[in-house]
Image: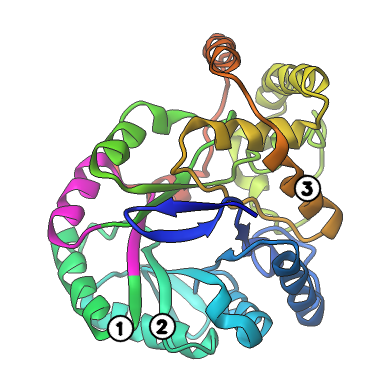
Amino acid sequence: MKQRTLGKELQVSEIGLGCMGLSFSQPPFPTKEEAITFIREAYKKGVTFFDTAEIYGPFDNEEILGEAVKDFRDKVVIATKFGFKYEGREIKGLDSSPKTMREALEGSLKRLQTDYIDLYYQHRVDPKTPIEVVATEMKSVIASGKVKYWGLSEASPRTIRKAHQVCSLTALQSEYSMFWRDAEKEIIPTLEELQIGFVPFSPLGKGFLTGTVTPGHIFPEGDFRNTVPRFNNPEYLAENMKLVDYVKELAIKKSTTPVGVALGWILAQKPWFVRIPGTKKIEHLEKNLEAITVEFSPEELKEIQKHLDSIELLGNRYSEASEKQIDKS
């Protein structure tokens, strides 16, 4: 698989694997053994960029990934995240204080069975801990060798600039897809200016762009989409299907699948975009990887952009509680 560069030098496979769904947020989950086997299969197919977080479980996801890649650790790039406080396994809110960050790092290293993390993200910006404090602490951690590169997730342009000035950022992870394009307004221009890589999560619109989610769709109990207005409001879901119809039309024209269109479109945006679609099934992984072959000409991209601009999408992408954790400073 071809490689892409995040920031100035971090080389990763052009499609990564978002591991969240293997143990968190989107049940039913595979067994630990099945999840480990799945990750190893992804590696055999060329995926070398794996995304996890301490909160996924919490903690279980990192343990699964660590066990899965321990025999070829030096051949892969592991990205994980910090930024929450816990009481046992119960999440108690945001916390990126230096003490909590150090404790989180040591926990992640142990669970991942490694002595370094390739890319360490602040999962959500902590309003109680100035980003300059986080960046200063990260600079020290990077100097120690326990972290190679760092990034932010769902951060505002202002926060990105302030953090980058203290300790150079390698990547920003935020939601971006045909289903949610807000990053085009300020985020992407800021990243391009500062030469920071972009790792869009939910590149398939949380599954919406696959065409498998239709009005009346019932998600399993515990699936986070049950709390998301774009999915739990039948009126919004029905109205937004016009985007899926358009993606299906493009798929026919390009002799591919809706998945191929959605992922190929992101790949075509910028050479420093790296997608991390998540899945739990080999057949879905193979469809995701087929997107590598889907190409769009500049003219096609302009036409698609024009059409996307004409489609009004309804509903927020997060629940009210999750929305409060998004940095809008």
| Residue 270, percent from left and from top | 46, 35
| Residue 314, percent from left and from top | 57, 22
Amino acid at dot 3: Phe
Compute the Cα span from label 1 to label 3. Answer: 42 Å
Residue named by callout 3: 219
Element type at mark 3: loop
**Which residues, given as a range, are shown in magenta?**
149-168
Residue named by callout 2: 116
Q: Of label 3 and label 2, which has the lower sequence position?
A: 2
Q: Is residue 201 visible?
A: yes
Q: Are marks 1 and 2 in contact (CB under 8 Å)?
A: yes
Compute the Cα span from label 1 to label 2. Answer: 7 Å
Element type at mark 2: loop
Q: Which residue lies at the image location 65% right of the left edge and 87% below the top edge?
A: 71
Compute the Cα span from label 3 to label 2. Answer: 37 Å
Task: Locate the C terminus and report the quarter of the image it occupies.
Answer: top left
Q: Is residue 204 above or below residue 29?
A: above
Amino acid at dot 1: Gly
Q: Are marks 3 and 2 in contact (CB under 8 Å)?
A: no
Residue named by callout 1: 145
| Residue 60, percent from left and from top | 61, 79
Mark 2 Cα shell of 10 Å, populated few (<14), some (14-19), many (≥20): many
Amino acid at dot 2: Tyr
